[in-house]
Amino acid sequence: MERARLVLLACSFGIGALSPTTAQDRTPRAADHAATLRPEELRVCEAMARLDWADASERLLDAIGRAGTGARAAMLAECQVHDLAEVATRYANPERLRPRVAALAAGKLAAAHPTLRDALDQLALRWAHDQGDLQACARLRTKLGYLVDWWMIGPFDNERGAGFDTAHPPERGFAQNRPCDGKKRPVTWRRLTTFEPSGRIDLGAMVEPSQQVLAYTATCLHSAVAQNVVLQLGSSQSFQVFLGGTKIAERRVHRDHHVDQDAVLLPLHAGDNLLVLKICTEEGPLEFTARLRDVRGGPAEVEARAEDAALQRAAAAPAAAKPGNPAPSLGARSGLTESGADAYRLGRILLQIGADDYRSPRPRELAETAVRALPDAAFARLLLARSLVMRGPVKAEERDDNPARHALEDLLAKHPEQLQALYTLAAMDLESTRAVDAVLRRVRTGLGSRPGCASLLLLEAKALEAIDLDALALRSLDAAATIDAQGGLLVHARRELAARHLRAGRLEAARACLESLVARCQSPGDAEDLASVLLRAGKRDAAVQLLLGKIRVLPYARGLRVQLARLLAAEGNHAEALKHLREWLTICPEDDGALLMTARFHGELGQVDAQREALRTAVTLNPNRKKERRLLEFLEAEEKPFYHGYEIDSAPVIAADPGPPKDAATAQDPLYYLLDHTVLHAYRNGTTSRYRHFIARILNEAGARQMSRYAVRHWDEQRARLLRVQVHKKDGEVLRPRLHGWAVALPPLGKGDVVDIRYRIDDLAPSFFGDYFG
């Protein structure tokens, strides 16, 4: 990659908006080279070393609140916000911690230093999303300058990363209706209909296939004056940025997505500017976040417009100029030195936000610098071990040569109180060697030092489960998953406990675990499991409300929408089920599985034309759907069935009902027919097809029992299929039960209800009647 093309800091890592830096700010001072961290930082390190995440959270908030004044204080406070965000991935307690973070973001230090303010607001946005507070999400998202209104086109091929260097037409401008050759089929621009309240754009949820692909997004940035603004970008893997058809920045990188991993200077001219992002993936998610700040770190005076006309104007605007210097600042990542305690601080941030390639030696080099400067500091050696672990999983045969293992063992030899190191080493043993005895010895040593440590109890439970001591494992897991006195919990332990309860059929216990999780963090799997538990407990309304609420918070969670659609269809509410599937198909039009479900629901409603159309689209997208292709061929063979033109509209028949025969009550007739209509078609090969449509009104309880389940009578040499079944209740409600081939269970019937049934029977072999008339 040509480094000259990048308008990125040489070490462009991590979270943070932009903060003005001066030569004085960047000049190393004695404090930068302090022999150790500040006392409040050391207390945080001690809490983390004990795996005491609740105490670490409290100490971090106290340290941020007492950071002092000035640029250096703000920069160190920003480092602690990163630490707090890392703790939040393990320990969930947003109800307690979120208000305190909001208060810090409104404080004097954050007001004077945009980088710190944005870091605090990012954490507040994350917790607002975790708690499903959509109003707060919208306010913080706007305040932070997130770009969420985009057009997208894709997927394009990116097999083994080759697409990164391939220039596709979207790089040259915005042609809304002009198709391009995609990975498997032609693709065109389409406007995105949804985004996550946190500001994340999940392109992988919108395209099929979603692996070894890339996609482009485009929006218009309208500026009243010519100015430089900064694009804060986070991406799952490689990216390129185009402004007005000019490539402004690019990075070829393998990493997980995190907000604000890179900062790109955008030289906007007055008027409309076309911004195009190229987001690539080989394996894993295809997602990004993007937001705008001014060069001082404050809100950018730019309006994002995604209307078609605005993008067309932007595409016709002059090409953008190449940005000049200075490169955008990245807050603490730009201001920290690379020596002493600062090397430790910077190394932690790089590991926390993973902005660089996962194979980058940069975090390890910083950790080694910190160890050389602070040889007796356990926290520096722990950072070094962690930087080595981040290289990836180690095979069992490589165990003895694992540098991360050696670093952890050396650390524990000198600092046996380092429970975080002990936990990491034991977890490596359990994953790579399955040496359960060694794992249990380490864990119990740690529990002797700190009884009740949730992280160690969770690891103990996993080790006990590996040797089939399930009862003991459950006891340890139950202790690990306990909600603490502050209302927080260890997320992974609580989730694992819920899974155990579900497997054992302990629904109430599973429900309690899952409810505590969905109140504190957003995981589609937790919500799906809780909805299933509620349904099994007969709490249908609660399950539906849960699914509807979580879909608003997690719009890319396909499983939630499918679960809701299946539930509604099972209740006979096909129209509402189809509505939710259509909403999903506006997000991912190429989801052949959702299209097939749509086709099935249309078929159950007797909407054959819509069923055929959904099937056509699905098998075009996925030609391997052979069973569905055969069904489509069958339906297409009779786009106009043999009874076309002989169908009778039910509504006028029911409206003109003259009432039952006069002797019906005396004869105790269970029902009477308003209509009994049959069409018979004979074929030349000796087979026949029969279409029957009847409408019957229920007269008494015997009639209700008789029609509670209807099955089409037919022979083994025949195929029968219900086409449409409706129940017209006396109060005017129309019910459509779910159809299953040739039999259907009707909803509860009462006197006066009307049953409207249409079906067909087709001979599979010649019959006497067919031979005679065919």
Image (tube, rainbow, N blue to C red):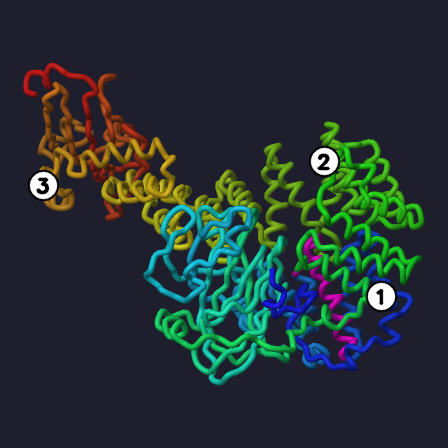
Quadrant of the snapshot with the N terminus:
bottom right
| Count of marks, rendered view | 3
Q: Which amino acid does label 2 sit on?
A: Leu
Residue 255 seen from this side: yes
Type of amino acid under label 1: Ala
Q: Residue at x 79, y 74 (%)?
A: 67
The numbered mark, 1 or 3, whose residue comes first in the sequence reads 1
Mark 2 = which residue? 474
Give above or below for 480 relative to 695.
Answer: below
- Rendered location of residue 295, percent (x, y): 61, 79
Q: Give x and y (percent) for residue 608.
A: 24, 40
Amino acid at dot 3:
Pro
Q: Is mark 3 on a helix, strand or loop?
A: loop
Is residue 571 at all visible to an observer of this figure? no
Q: Tell me the crowding category of disc 3: few under 14, some 14 to 19, or many 20 or more residues within 10 angstroms, Cα based.
A: few
Viewed as shown, does residue 549 lie left or right of 730?
Answer: right
Label ID, residue 341: 1
Q: Considering only vertical position in the picture, is 30 above or below 586? A: below
Q: Tell me the SS state at disc 1.
A: helix
Q: Which residue lies furthest to the left in this view?
A: 773
Question: In front: 111, or 569?
Answer: 111
Q: Which of marks 1 and 2 is nearer the N terminus?
A: 1
Front residue of 578/194: it is 194
Magenta range is 71-94
Residue identifier under label 3: 658
In terms of depth relative to the viewer, which is nearer, 493 or 391?
391
